[in-house]
Amino acid sequence: MIEIKGLVVRYKTVEFKFDDYKFKKNMISIISGRNGTGKTTLLKSLSSLIEYEGNIKVNGEITYNSQEPILFNRSTYENIVYPLRIRNLDLNLYKEKIDKYTRVLSIDHLLNENALKLSSGEKMKVSIIRSIIFNPDIVLLDEPTTHLDLESIVELTTLIKELKNELTFIIVSHNSSFVEELKDEEYRLGGNHVYS
Ligand SMILES: Nc1ncnc2c1ncn2[C@@H]1O[C@H](COP(=O)(O)OP(=O)(O)OP(=O)(O)O)[C@@H](O)[C@H]1O
Ligand SMILES: [Mg+2]
């Protein structure tokens, strides 16, 4: 669960005021709004990546998957297990999950490839798996379908639906069929930002 109250983010020339809202547990919440309405800004403030005023109450461990994922100069496998390594978790216990997620998203053949050589869509898939592999409570996905082909979007939809009982998803997406397939709740942005 995440609750926002009186949340305001100020940049040099623009200020965003977000309506109070409660993102519920084990729900898929979609954040919608036109370009520049502050969707990424909201996700970054929820995951404490930027400064904000007001209150954000987060129940559980949160993970943010960027619109432009950054991968390390290591294999796909090493990128995926990074969150496990830094938590000193036993990688063997996650083998099945890694196999399953990489198979569902059709990147299982790329586990030994250098992640920097992957295509944009493949990189996004690696990044998504990396952000869910360690069982976080809340997963923020910023435009996860941007570089994905139609089949991959269906695969990602299947994976998210399967994980819905264990994880809470907050997703920014402009892809209407993806949104319709997944949406439990919608938080719409627009109108509450002022340029000076
Ligand atoms: N660090 C920053 N400094 C100054 N202005 C910023 C900063 N980050 C974002 N902005 C401005 O705030 C506005 C909202 O940006 P944001 O990335 O949150 O929009 P968005 O809704 O995610 O858009 P898109 O749909 O294009 O991804 C933009 O106009 C951008 O120029
Ligand atoms: Mg954005």
Image (cartoon, helix red, strand yellow):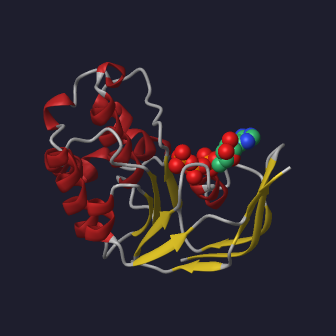
Q: Nearer the viewer, residue 163 or 98?
A: 163
| Left or right placement of residue 18 versus residue 176 in this view | right
Q: Is residue 195 above or below residue 161?
A: above
Residue ID at (49%, 42%): 86
Residue 68 percent coordinates (x, y):
47, 36
Residue 41 percent coordinates (x, y):
64, 52
Q: Is residue 73 above or below residue 106?
A: above
Residue ID at (23%, 47%): 98
| Left or right placement of residue 60 versus residue 109 in this view | right
Q: Quadrant of ligand 1?
A: top right
Residue ID at (35%, 52%): 133
Res 99 visible: no
Residue 59 percent coordinates (x, y):
58, 74
Q: Answer with the quarter of the image where residue 136 lies.
A: bottom left
Q: Nearer the viewer, residue 35 or 65?
A: 35
Residue ID at (45%, 46%): 88
Q: How many marks?
A: 0
Q: Is residue 62 above or below residue 28?
A: above
Residue 64 percent coordinates (x, y):
51, 52
Q: Is residue 11 above or below residue 8?
A: above
Res 182 visible: yes
